Image (spheres, rainbow, N blue to C red):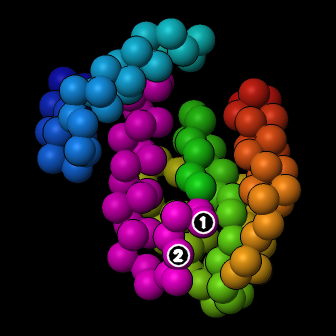
Amino acid sequence: MVKTISYLLIFLNLYSCSAVTSIGAVVGNASTSTRGFSASIDDTVLMTKIITKISGIELKNFTDITVSVSNGHVLLAGNVESQSKRLELVQAVWKTDGVKNVYNEMSLDSSPTFSQRADDLLFETRIKNRL
């Protein structure tokens, strides 16, 4: 567990522009989570693995994809340009160690409206609350 936390802190330090803020947010979120510190860290490590894996997939706009993890359950939301890219993303997530289930809520649309983005955020929040 200590080794995992060390890797997470090193990754956040190298990856983030504001390392202190990012590390503080992860630790703060983990300490206030009802699932406990260890489960929150495990989810953060799993999300890091997933994002690292899917960042290698060529997409028009990677920022249109949202990844949420709770107890090994992964929610993919957002917009992708083709069915083949959507399938590639889902397969990459399933191949990640620690993933128990994948909820694919990605739509095939390259230009989401503001209201669609707001609906996606609301939907994501509802699912997070249920998990």
65 or 115, nearer to the observer: 115
- Circle 1 — which element? helix
Could you say where residue 17 lies in the image, as x and y percent from the top left? Answer: 23, 44
Dividing the image into 4 quarters, which one contains the N terminus?
top left
Residue at numbered disc 2: 61
Which residue type carries mark 1?
Asp
Where on the picture, by quarter, is residue 54? bottom left
Q: Callout 1: few (<14), some (14-19), or many (20+) C-alpha neighbours within 10 Å? A: some
- Identify which residue is drawn at 65% across, 58% down: 76
80 relative position to 69: left or right: right
Could you say where residue 11 lies in the image, as x and y percent from the top left? Answer: 20, 44
Dividing the image into 4 quarters, which one contains the C terminus?
top right
- Identify which residue is drawn at 15% across, 47% down: 14
71 or 124, nearer to the observer: 124
Residue contact between numbered discs 2 and 1, judged by CB atoms under 8 Å: yes
Magenta region's main secondary structure?
Answer: helix
Where on the picture, by quarter, is residue 111? bottom right
- Identify which residue is drawn at 54% across, 15% down: 33
Residue 34 versus residue 40 in the image, above or below: above
- Identify which residue is drawn at 34% across, 61% down: 52
31 relative position to 7: left or right: right
58 relative position to 88: left or right: left
* Magenta segment includes 88: no
Residue 7 versus residue 96 in the image, above or below: above
- Circle 2 — which element? loop
Confirm whether residue 100 shows in the render: no
Where on the picture, by quarter, is residue 51? bottom left
Residue at numbered disc 1: 64
Could you say where residue 56 lies in the image, as x and y percent from the top left? Answer: 36, 76
User: Which segment is the magenta one?
Assistant: 38-65
